[in-house]
Image (cartoon, rainbow, N blue to C red):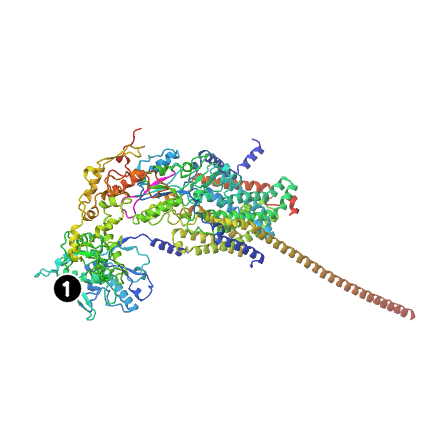
Amino acid sequence: MSVLVLALCIEAKDTGEILDHRSDLITIDTLESFGDLERPEVIFLHDLHTEALEKSNKDCRTCHLSEKSSKDRLSLKFKRLEDTDKKQVMDVYHAECMGCHREMSASGQTSGPIEVCGECHKENTRLISARLPMAFDKSLHFRHTEANKDEKTNKGNCALCHHEYDKTAKKLFYAKDKEGSCRYCHMKETQDNRMSIRLASHSGCIDCHKKAVAEKKKTGPINCAGCHDAKMQQEIEKIAEVPRLERKQPDVVLIQANNQKTKKDDRMSGMNPVPFDHKAHEGYNDTCRVCHHASLDSCSKKCHTPTGSKEGNYVNFESAMHQKGNKKSCLGCHEINKNQPNCAACHSLNAGNPMIETSCKICHMKPLLKNSPATPMDEKLMAEMLLKSRKVASSTYKDEDIPDKVIIKELAEEYEPVELPHGKIINTLLNNIKNNTLAGYFHAEKGTVCRSCHHNSPLDPKPPRCGSCHGKPFDQGNIFRPGIKGAYHQQCNRCHQELNIEKPTSTGCTDCHKTKKK
Amino acid sequence: MSEKAAEASKSFFTPFNVVAGLIVIIGLIITVLRFTGGLASVTNLSDYNPWGIWIGFDLLVGVALAAGGFVTSAAVYLFGMKKYHSAVRPAILTGFLGYALVVLALNYDVGRPWRLPYPFLVQQGTTSVLFEVAACVGLYLTVLFVEFSPAALEWLGLRKARRMVVKLTLLLTIFGVVLSTLHQSSLGALFLIAPSKLHPLWYSPYLPVYFFITSIIAGLSMVIFESTLSYRYLSHKMDEAHLKEKNDVTLGFGKAASYVLAGYFAIKVIGISTGNHWHLLGTSYGLWFLLELFGFVALPCFLYAVGVRDKNLKLIKWTSVLAILGIILNRFNVCLIAFNWHLPSSERYFPHWMEIGISIFIVTLGVVFFKFIATRMPILYEHPEYSDTH
Amino acid sequence: MPISRRKFLGWMGAAAGLSTAFGSPVHAAANKHFTGYPDSLGILFDSMLCIGCRKCEAGCNKVNELPPPDQPFDDLTVLSKKRRTDTKTFTVVNRYDHPQGTPPPLFRKIQCNHCLEPACASACFVKAFTKTKQGSVVYDASVCVGCRYCMIACPFEIPTYEYDKALAPRIRKCTMCHPRVIEGKLPGCVEICPNEALSFGKRKDLIKIARERIRKYPDRYEDHIYGEHEMGGTSWLYLSGVPFKALEMREDLGVTPAPELTAGALSVVPMVAGLWPVLLTGLYAVSKRKEKIAKLEQQQAVASTLKKANAEAEAKLSNALANARKEKDAAIKREIKKALEEAKQTQETEGS
């Protein structure tokens, strides 16, 4: 009975908190492909082992065998080239792991478990994977191309990494001007003989880095933490101004939904076309994959057709361009941009996100036609011309029309009336966004910026007073509308919060209105 | 001082009287403090812990241990086990004193004790389990009083009254079993309303069943315990029938207790199964639960069985102590230990010494009154004038 | 020792009755689902609008004429500790760190939730709590006995007790300013809140407002209105931008209203009261009958034994009598023989 008690005590103790966050944590569950696991998966710390082996001057080949195809390439499997059957794979792991551990402990070094199953096959480990995915952005790409340039021609050696696969010849080959992201072919899971992105990136990157290390050149990491640890990722050098990646891409594009070009009339059907400044947008993102998430082709060519297709996962063209919350779509990325503090100051307010009809027209512009006969002109030219003609907000109403101070005396019972520095606020807000072209386009019409506070009313240099709509709170006829006190406080507080303003604070009542002297 | 007076004074200051007297005096002092300074001055009750040992021990344990009354009277009058007849009066007396003292204890705990009749006279909160507890306890106290009264009436020599009351025995016994079933189980049902506060190993929709069954165990064990103490200290008051039967009482009640403990063990395990709480047994509360289940349910069950088989009276008597401790532990667990188990230790409750003082005071009063009544009224013996009327 | 049939039947009956009754809650009483009195009022607390200024605490204190606090209401340093309601404070605001550790901190106002089916009202054995038509749960100190079962029952740990009062201790809790509300005024906390983090109105309208806020700002709010269904529904509703657990609000309370938890046990009471007397009387009758039969059998056994003994005695007697007569005859014969022989002898001695 006491043994039972003791055992339960120990078991109870084991379900403690997480001790260690590791970026090199690998879960060995290979046998799962052969059926249900009998014992828990083994948690393996890769960097721990490489560091220990380094001390004995042992390298990767201690555990990783060379691929049959090329001696330089190492198989990412442990001490084997393929998973044959359950018993063989298990024996490899057991014999090799425990054998090495025995050798090391025999020579007096601290080592891993030798005998007891449960020491590797732990039921409740206190380790958790802290591995961050590694992003290969344009800064890193630039550093790689520079490092591997052909010294004589000064041109990039793209064939080093970029390849395509010839199905008939069953060989990899380099296709010029067809280079794309690895992830366009290498998916999350291995498919037939196409490796997963994980295997491909480790096999491709680490082998090259190892070679460079052998040649004593400055290169990237070869251990797990170097790429996947949060702190180490921060230390990766980031080039500020990356020159444009040349891949014969257009500077401007005219995006339009051509609905199976009806030959009956050559008019373009659907919404007005959108002139798209491709060059500028390249500068706004770290990788091409933000928009070109599956291929560098045009969005609507094969995948996001107007009615949707299998290749595009049945996401139709309209959805692809406008889906909210998704950086891949135009509208989605613009919306996400509005969360920056300088934008959110206005756009996070109640009724601060009106989707009005005129918003569409800012992107969708009336197509230009050649004079005679009335035919559409060359797309690229039209795009360039439309882009140039797009209005950018330069200013709002004239300064004389904007009151500098506004006295709010509606609720002055406990406090004195508020002296709102109206002019100062507007100037600050406008200053914050003056360099933002996106804001500039959408604020082109005078008075648009005023609408964040003066909302739910027509555009006018003299907008209605807040009190004309906001009265007593909890009005049965307008349950969604706050009362005047709530309206003022919610509006002001929210903006101050977004801009992280230190004074006035939301709890500093007298910052805005002094207490009334009785 | 004259010899007689000296003798009289010497006989009053027995060790028992001195100790009991001290406890009573301290108890009375605390009583005054309680009613002048409020509950805060004598208890460690808080807003998180509104019920302390005055409910956990005085009420919950007290009512369970006073269950010997209905168990014994049911055994003798309903099941017809005449050989336990001598155990009825002491059990009824224990029961009556137990319930009376529970009501006394309630007067300490409740904020305005003079309003205790309100649920019956002013407004009936019939949705409340506590209302049902109060009603049944009140009625049962009356039943016990009437069941006890023949002994007092015999002492007072009121033959006619006594004859009338004795006629009611069967009715009172049935009524007593009904009321006992209801309020013993309802004391458990009180906690059904707080599933978020009671540890899942103790919270169960079967709480009322558990409390009822444990009350039977408590009653059976208390009769054995009380008879042991009575024989030790009051054997000079026991008549021949009593002395002859008492071993049978111990054996018979021990056997019954063993059976009921076995059944209780089974339904507790069933309770864990239906709630799928097996995995909780490995936690620290789980170990405590297993201690309660194995040390204070399975063990006394086994020991009772061995004692009965070997006719080992001493073992049965000690086992009754163990079983009673188990009941106390169970009630404490439900009300104090597993209750509010999720709160941080700074908010947990431990009784004030004055609360413990009052509880001891009340138990002492019970012992004193029992001694007083048993030495004067025909509890442990049959009144010679009425022996033919049984 | 084998258990007697009588005993077995008795226990089986008891066990069957108890287990079927206690095993699962009886639904007859709990079939009704109370969704609140029509047009009953409530309050929506939006933790995304709460700035932790504690003005609601001040307003409550003023309106209920509560004693002044130890630290003034504009002292925001008290927020570093987690507080609960007490006898002088019907509501408190607590500050919580954002679970991702990023400022700004979050706030929650704690007060009675005025449940649709309050646990306190169900638990009170003198009906000291009333769920009013306006939605507030009010307490009547004039009948309260002070048993504090309501404090055990409340899953939100709200009622507090005046333990320090000896003669007139009361339960204290938020009243939703019921006297003000029936006059058409706003509750004290709602009226004073500068940011309108508290919205007052019909409960069904508040749910619409909450749903609308979630719909409009799906990134800002958790898609759950706390109190819509918890414990059967409460009149005080909550919106949050983080999981409610991070505001130390229990997410494990379930949707069963508290009265339903004890309805099962209470429903058994009339069953026991009705059936037990029958079962126990039956037991008594069976045991009495067994006694009677035992007595009868004993009598019969005695009678037959007596009869047998009598018969034996009679037989013995007649035997003895027969023997005696035989002996008597034999003795007479002997005597005659003896007399004849004596006579013969005397004749012989006389003749010679």
Q: Quadrant of residue B355?
A: top left
Q: Which residue is mark 1?
A: A176
A174 on left or right of A319:
left
Q: Residue at x 85, y 68 (%)?
A: C337
Whether residue C102 appears in magenta in the rendering, the answer is yes
- Where's residue C116, x and y in %? 43, 45
Residue B52 visible from this viewpoint: no
Q: Quadrant of residue A27?
A: bottom left
The count of marks equals 1
Q: Quadrant of residue A61?
A: bottom left
View extreme (right): residue: C351
- Where's residue A455, x and y in %? 27, 43
Q: Is residue A486 above or below residue B171?
A: above
Residue B378 visible from this viewpoint: yes
Q: Residue at x 56, y 35 (%)?
A: B8
- Where's residue C110, x and y in %? 37, 42
Amino acid type assigned to the residue bearing label 1 in the image: Lys
Q: Which residues are magenta?
A: C89-105
B150 on left or right of A402:
right
Whether residue C77 appears in magenta in the rendering, the answer is no
- Where's residue B354, x and y in %? 44, 38
> Quick one: quadrant of the N terminus of chain A?
bottom left
Name the element at disc 1: loop
Q: Of A460 and A481, which appears nearest the observer?
A: A460
Q: Is residue A165 above or below residue C6?
A: below
Q: Of B362 and C176, which appears nearest the observer?
A: C176
> Quick one: quadrant of the C terminus of chain A?
top left
Within 10 Å of disc 1 (Cα), the crowding (few <14, some 14-19, many 20+) is few
The overriding secondary structure of the stretch rendered in magenta is: loop
View extreme (top): residue: A518
C55 on left or right of A430:
right
View extreme (front): residue: A372
